[in-house]
Amino acid sequence: MQPLRKADPSTIAGYRLLGRLGAGGMGVVYLARTAGGTLSALKLIRAEHAADPGFRERFRREAVAAERITGRWVVRVLGSDPEAREPWLATEFVPGPSLAEAVALHGALPEPTVRALGARLASALDDMHGAGLVHRDVKPGNVLLALDGPRLIDFGIARTAGATALTATDAMIGTPGFLAPEQARAAGAGEVGPASDVFSLGCVLAYTLTGERPFGTGGVAAVVYRTVHEEPDLDGVPSALLPLVGACLVKDPADRPTAAEVRASLGGGDGPAGDWLPPGLPALIAQRSSRVLDLPVAEPTMLVDPGQPRAMSRRRVLVAGSAAAVAGAGGLTAWLLSRTSGGAGPGTGGTAAPLATYTIGVLTDLSGPTKADGRGQERGIRLAVEEFNALRDRPFDVRLRVEDDAGKRDRAKAGALALLKVPGLVAVLGPTLTPTAVAAGDELAFSGVPLASVVADVPAGQIKGQETKTNYIQPRTIQDMMTVPFGRYLTEHGAVRTAVVEDRAGGEYSWFAVKNMKEYPPSGEKGGAVTAHAVEADSEDFGAAVRAALATDPQGVMYVGTSPRRAALCARALRDQGYRGPRGSVEHVLQPEFLTVAGAAAEGWYFGTGYVDPDGLPKAKRFAVAYRRRWGLAGTAPVDRFATEAYDVANWTFQAVRTAAANNAESVTSGVRNSLLQTPYQGLAKTYSAQANKDTPTALLGLYLWQVKSGVPRFLGSFDEAARAGT
């Protein structure tokens, strides 16, 4: 729990606020105390979100649904006001850890504990289903552990069985790895019923018994694909519980047991919980409970009249001014543009006393398969460090330490361990591949050192310990969204029929891309439709698939896959069969190999990417000039991919170090991690945020459109503006 901030209210509707339990883009959850002394978790929604009628309706629905649930094993609603300017909902407060945290700390739980846990969760679901509700997000993070038994929480997406969705964002409800196949397929709401909760409960039981998710980890596409098409991995589930868990996880909802049947199989869930927890967990729960009970009454925090609109406090102005000053460091290239070879080098800023020195580690591929992207990152970061150390008024010095992982997991692990031995290490930047980022993240997580990459796309849950303490930060748009730029181009140009060539060599990525394209087709509001035409992984004959695609008379063709060479074969097949309409693909494909193999057939192709060309951004042109000068590149040579983004993230890290040092943080490394997680940064390319992949509007800030012109990829700009402009 964090202390209240000065901008926080002291009370809400008679609830005395004691501290912050958590905060996100939608609002804040406070620990509060009623007039009678009962502790509660009070969720307060920000006014800007409450102004959206659709959002307010969803919150109103959550409050109504939660108030209808009165079973022993759910948290009770203590009060709510969905109509307030800032709507709020207060529930009972459970001081214990979540089931996800318990498994992360203690590993798999013993069978007797899981039987008691499962029986009581099944009882909670049975009560919900009896009230005509479906939870739809049963997962370890939504189960809190108390001394007398578990509590099911978070009814934000609970609905009456069979209710229709309010928005398109509800297409796939739940958490991948714990949702049912009918949810993963984004099936009609009528198919998502009580049986879906039973499937999720089966996933929770398997996870709690083994410490592993039954459908594995990885990208959303991979987990969803396995949930829909493959059998769960139940190795490690005790034989006595295997039939029940297996029955919960069958694909057909009609063949699953009811929640009441699950409860009966596990021994019922209405009696006293007894001594149900394994050693270690009761002590943790008791410790947290006593810590909360000993809380003093917080001092009043709101410094403005709560009846008036909140103006920016002086403290906020100061913080904003400091952040703006650091954000301005994105233009530090003026130093490089003005210096001469005989001028003062880095570190001669004229400070009167020795400065503290902090180390930024760069762990990237400088000699392996992705060395071009690694070189771009290393150069961009080094340029940012040199500029910072040349500032006369800098508050500290930055030391750079570079490790080459060669694109290999073992090298990444060894590099991370080597960096941890360097004095003053506050952050590590730069992995280019998912496996190397995971290997490095696993080593750095234990020490709390933040790791960031603008290249690697690491799905949630792959790096150890992220459920309880996030240290991996990925300020880039995920690869699953790279179909959006060309899709938007087709929409803006009135394409109603789109043909997708699905390269099954791309595995789950291709499957998920096709699924997304069909669910959200270009020109969808005007009746747009997408057809998919597959090329098997063991075939290089794209002719038949292209022929079938062109038979639909498409107004746009998209290749979805991960291979530049196979995409080039698709391009050649389209050219050979006379298609000259819009053609496009994704970031994976935009590589020199595509241009070489496709030859003239590459001309005109569009690509969605997560990186920019600084020459195409007015405020980044000085950076591009400085970058070429620093690295001896010709004036017409392109700036390396991801160099701009790496430069920005380095300056974002400097901002975080400034904040941590100014706040006299006990651990500057922890302060840097917290600042990166909480404070966005306006860079040359875009606004960077640790929340970039958690909601679509933020994620779309990092999508760009490119087109091959005269045999060379040309940056067209932010995907939405570029799509409207056309070429």
Image (tube, helix red, strand yellow):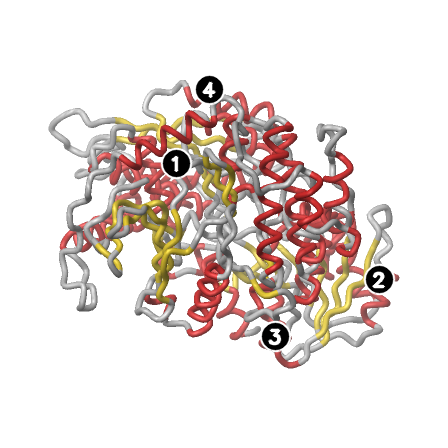
Q: Nearer the viewer, mark 3 or mark 1?
A: 3
How many residues crowd around disc 4 within 10 Å: few (fewer than 14), some, or many (20 or more)? few
Q: Are marks 3 and 4 in contact (CB under 8 Å)?
A: no
Name the residue located 40 percent from the left edge and 18 percent from the top edge.
421
Q: Amino acid at mark 2?
A: Ala
Which numbered disc flags the more N-terminal residue, 3 or 1? 1
Closer to the camera in the image, 596 or 176: 176
How many residues crowd around disc 2 within 10 Å: few (fewer than 14), some, or many (20 or more)? many
Q: CA distance from mark 3 to mark 2?
A: 23 Å
Residue beneath disc 2:
545
Quadrant into which the C terminus falls: bottom right
Q: CA distance from mark 1 to mark 4?
A: 19 Å
Position of residue 323 measured from the top left corner of the image (x, y, whole percent): 25, 49
Q: Nearer the viewer, mark 1 or mark 4?
A: 4
Q: Is residue 719 left or right of residue 53?
A: right
Quarter residue 340 falls in:
top left
Closer to the camera in the image, 20 or 260: 260
Residue beneath disc 4:
418
Q: Is residue 111 left or right of residue 387?
A: right
On screen, residue 235 above or below 525: above
Residue beneath disc 3:
491
Q: CA distance from mark 3 to mark 1?
A: 41 Å
Q: Is residue 516 visible?
A: yes
Which numbered disc flags the more N-terminal residue, 3 or 2? 3
Q: Secondary structure at mark 1?
A: helix
How many residues crowd around disc 1 within 10 Å: few (fewer than 14), some, or many (20 or more)? many
Q: Amino acid at mark 1?
A: Arg
Q: Amino acid at mark 3?
A: Thr
Labelled disc at residue 382? 1
Closer to the camera in the image, 465 or 673: 465
Q: Is residue 435 left or right of residue 326?
A: right
Q: Is residue 333 visible?
A: no
